[in-house]
Image (cartoon, helix red, strand yellow):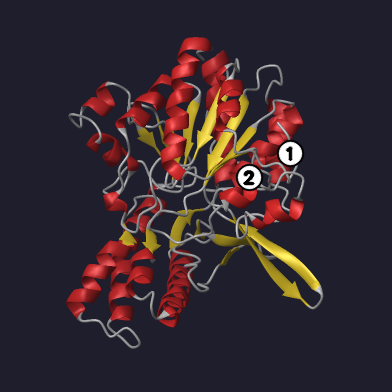
Amino acid sequence: MTDSPTNYSLDADTTLDRLAKTDRLLIIQDLDGVCMGLVRDPLTRRMERRYIEAARRLDGGFYVLTNGEHIGRRGVNRIVEQAMDAAHHAGERGLYLPGLAAGGVQLQDRHGAVTHPGVSDAELAFLQAVPAKAERFLIDLLTRPPFDLTEADATALAATCVLDNPASPTVNLNPLHHRFGDVPEHYVTAQRETVAFVDGLLRQAADAGLAGAFFVHYAPNLGRGADGLERVKFADGDNAGTTDFQFMIRGAIKEVGVLVILNHYFHRLTGDWPLGESFNAREAPQSHDELLALAKKRFDPKLMPRIVGVGDTLTSYPETDGDTVRHQRGGSDRGFLTLVQELGQAFGTDNVVIYVDSSTGEVRRPGVDEARLRQATGDPARAVAALEGISDADDPLRPNLILPGGHPQYVDWFCALAERRQTLAPT
């Protein structure tokens, strides 16, 4: 597969053919925007049963890696259960989606057994109190100028915005962007106030003896600043910028989850734990270089699978400083997809990075200009222009396959791959 920035592939069939015949294949996949549409209210998410059954057929070679959660009222397990004839079928038939949630600290097998490796009871207790605080914050905010909603309206809107996830409680401002989209400055005010709110939660945690236990994940974001913290993308025109403000457990970053998943993959393959049976996101190194060095040291190159990383959240925005133009690159899938790419280069496994265009959902974000991309052969400027807001000419992350049709196209492709592998090269 080429890594040329002028040749982003749209040929899903050829990629499928190659992967179907791969001896050892490991798919690591995001969820929202990839196998189901992006929506303003997570409670309205739906997942196709055929996708769930295809994931089951790829057992051992498929894991999810999401900043959402498996459990809770807004967890993915509830969506899986809704797709079944009866909720109990998911556990009985092993149809839950295995892998890591909450950024990498919530581990689940396909029967729905969930653990939080490395997370303390005190940390989980602090997180449990966050949703109520977030709802009170939003009600107070929305009943004041410039919003001036009634108490009843503010309460209803806050209940939609606050995601009561057990390990990653989140303030999702998509409903506010929808409500105040015609007054952009109101929405930006909400973004700034929410930043102040989550910063306050970090101070409260420190006062409770949990300094350094948590961090805030902004999605989408502008990458990390010199201080190592993620940078907020404030709304600009139709672009909503950062919509999700996730209060997360320190160490819960997706790229670390790649190594946790590989550790489980190797154990299933060989019976041994290359990184130790208790290895988890809390004790793993945090930088790409350290993660890559650890993988090269501990994983047997002869057994390393071909990894397919699938995501939908990448950003790249130019920043001008005098005559110099730099790009602020971010997106919650960028880290893990970049590591998948780097592992493929380090181990010679020809890994594949797939970008799913989720811009046609209910959440406004940059999309792929498919027509321009198809006409861009041999023209770097044209190819990059087709990915404006997503990538740039100097972006080190270069997806091998782009699916402009969004999650419906990916679900079709994924189901076809599972069927072909079952016939040609089962794991």
Q: Nearer the viewer, residue 332 or 252?
A: 332
Report the disc number at residue 80. none
Residue under the image location 77 percent in, 45 percent down: 378
In the image, 323 versus 272, the foreground residue is: 323
Q: Position of residue 407 (x, y in %)?
A: 43, 42
Q: Is residue 106 above or below residue 385?
A: above
User: How busy is the neighbourhood of tag 2: few (under 14 within 10 Å), some, or many (20 plus)?
Assistant: some
Q: Residues within 10 Å of mark 1 (few under 14, many from 20)?
A: some
At horizontal 31% and vertical 38% (from top left) the residue drawn is 77
The answer to whether residue 377 is left or right of residue 263 is right
Q: Is residue 277 above or below residue 318?
A: above
Please, which residue is most extreme toward the bottom here?
A: 145
Single out the mark in the foreground, 2 or 1: 2
Residue position for label 2:
374
Q: Residue reaching furthest right?
A: 323
Q: Are marks 2 and 1 in contact (CB under 8 Å)?
A: no
Left or right: 289 as drawn, with respect to 274 = right
Residue 11 picture quarter? top right
As helix, strand or loop, the secondary structure at mark 1 comes to: loop
Residue 285 appears anywhere in the view: no
Given the image, on which type of amino acid does mark 2 rest? Arg
Secondary structure found at label 2 = helix
Task: Please identify the quarter of the rendering in which residue 99 is found.
Answer: top left
Residue located beneath label 1 in the image? 3
Residue 76 is left or right of residue 401, and the answer is left
Is residue 314 at least partly visible in the picture?
Answer: yes
Residue 27 screen position, x and y as percent: 53, 30
Q: Give the position of the N terminus as an image quadrant.
A: top right
Image coordinates of residue 69 in percent, x first then y, are: 38, 45
Q: Is residue 205 above or below residue 144?
A: above
Identify the residue at horizontal 29%, vertical 40% (top origin): 79
Q: Position of residue 147 (x, y in %)?
A: 32, 83
